[in-house]
Image (tube, grey):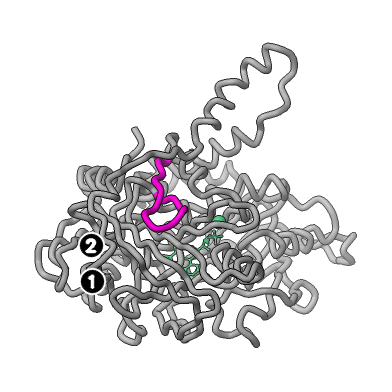
Amino acid sequence: MPYTDLREFIERLEKEGELRRISLEVDPFLEITEFADRAVKRGGPALLFEKPKGSRVPALINAFASMRRMELALEVSSIEEVAGRISGFLEMQKPEGLIGKLKMLPKLAEVGSFFPKMVSDGPCKEVVRRERFSLFDYPILQCWPCDGGRFITLPLVFSRNPETGKRNCGMYRMQVFDERTTGMHWQTHKQGAEHYRRMVARGAKRMDVAVAIGADPATMFSAVLPLPPDIDEMLFAGFLRGKPVEMVKCETSDLEVPAEAEIVLEGTIELGELRREGPFGDHTGFYSLEDDYPVFHLTCITQRKKPIYVTTIVGPPPMEDYFMGKAIERIFLPLMRLQLPEIRDVSMPAEGVFHNLMLVSIRKSYPAHARKVMHAIWGMGQAMFSKCIVVVDEEVDVQDAREVAWKALNNIDPQRDIEFALGPVDSLDHSSRLPNFGSKMGVDATRKWPEEGFARPWPSVIEMSAEVRERVDQLWKKAGLK
Ligand SMILES: Cc1cc2nc3c(=O)[nH]c(=O)nc-3n(C[C@H](O)[C@H](O)[C@H](O)COP(=O)(O)O)c2cc1C
Ligand SMILES: [Mn+2]
């Protein structure tokens, strides 16, 4: 059964020995970070701080911070199962004849059952505060020593495209400026920023935004997914959990939020109003610098009677977001292969913090095939941020970064096989010549063909013959070796 809410997920984590309750008083100012950082680096459990200093609301962190917990979050024994389900839908063909059509019905009905469902009330409305509310009631972390302040780090930010009326849900950190005001750190490439620009173009004065904190894990995870614009994250969440997400209308706007959320912040963004945001110890492992971002003015908070505040930290990898990113890598592989069927596998090692390094194996079929693949990836949604793409032949296991380094470094003639391209870069890149604009590197580390102008013979990788290996298996034991 899919989790109804965050609490059911917490129960499950606890049952599986994947969660530790901490009853000591711990300070959301830096101390929770140090706990969470140590825990993730040691493969430790999720942490539920029951007495965060200065707040009566408990704080949950690292709920997704291992592959096992990601699997528990999505209720699978391997993330590949989700990829398999997606492939199943993608392989749906136009049915032949009546029997074929009938066979397809259950699948179509399944799709129909993923759409979010409107409900008139929900636990997130147990307490409605239009006055006398304050963000200071919650254990919002200051994550790192040089951070500009406290940041809400796992918010589901809902906004609407004024042209299509379609909803978006993205995870964009929010710096707390005072009791009722925060920053809204949607980077320029993200859908929230696009909605903002379209509202400005229409001459609107303000834009409604609603933020949900804490929901069932599939719904929370969906806010991070790099879905194409106007594809509803809540529909994808329904697909992931196999049950619609129940949505309830906000008190002060027409937006809808997950009814089972722990805390909902309703408010508006005054178009044109910008404020310094940051610095913030970011997932690159460096502080991202201060910059101007829109300001979110809270008009109302609704919440459960006893809400749980869920949060995360980012910083030197690996952190919790690495595991979320790894799950995305697995889940999106079938979708990538829809456009680029020659792709065998893709990997984004932790040290590359997603956008800095993508390793791709392909079945090479024609000259310069690797170059086509890198350019296609630079043209594909948020994969456009990939600063360095290394393309290898299909027999190289890209999940093994050592194997890639060994083979790729042997295979390249750098001047011939490395190319630079200009394009949009991740807003967090501190090295690019301009914010959001810089260069990328593509490395063609495939075996070179005569058709690519390579006239020399290409050597094989060294391998012992199977017979000798078997014989030595026997001799090895006889020799008393272990
Ligand atoms: C913990 C965490 C924090 C994030 N913070 C931000 C952020 O502050 N700004 C941002 O633009 N993206 C942030 N992201 C990435 C976006 O959530 C992600 O790119 C998402 O796909 C955006 O959705 P959208 O395409 O609907 O805009 C964060 C992701 C995670 C996992
Ligand atoms: Mn989106």
Foreground: disc 2 or disc 1: 2
Q: Name the residue under label 2.
A: 59
Query: On screen, 42 above or below 329?
Result: below
Looking at the rendering, the quadrant in which ligand 2 lies is: bottom right
Q: Name the residue under label 1.
A: 32
Look at the numbered discs 2 and 1 and tell me whether their residues touch, using CB distance below 8 Å. yes
Q: What stretch is highlighted in magenta?
A: 245-257
* Residue located at (72% from left, 48% from top): 339
In reply to whether residue 290 is colored magenta, the answer given is no
Q: What element carries label 2?
A: strand
Q: Which quadrant of the rendered structure holds the N terminus?
A: top left
Q: Is mark 1 on a helix, strand or loop?
A: helix
Mark 2 is surrounded, within 10 Å at the Cα level, by few (under 14), some (14 to 19) or many (20 or more) other residues, namely many
- On screen, residue 289 versus residue 417, left or right, reads left
* Residue 135 percent coordinates (x, y): 27, 70
* Residue located at (36% from left, 36% from top): 2
Q: Residue furthest left?
A: 24
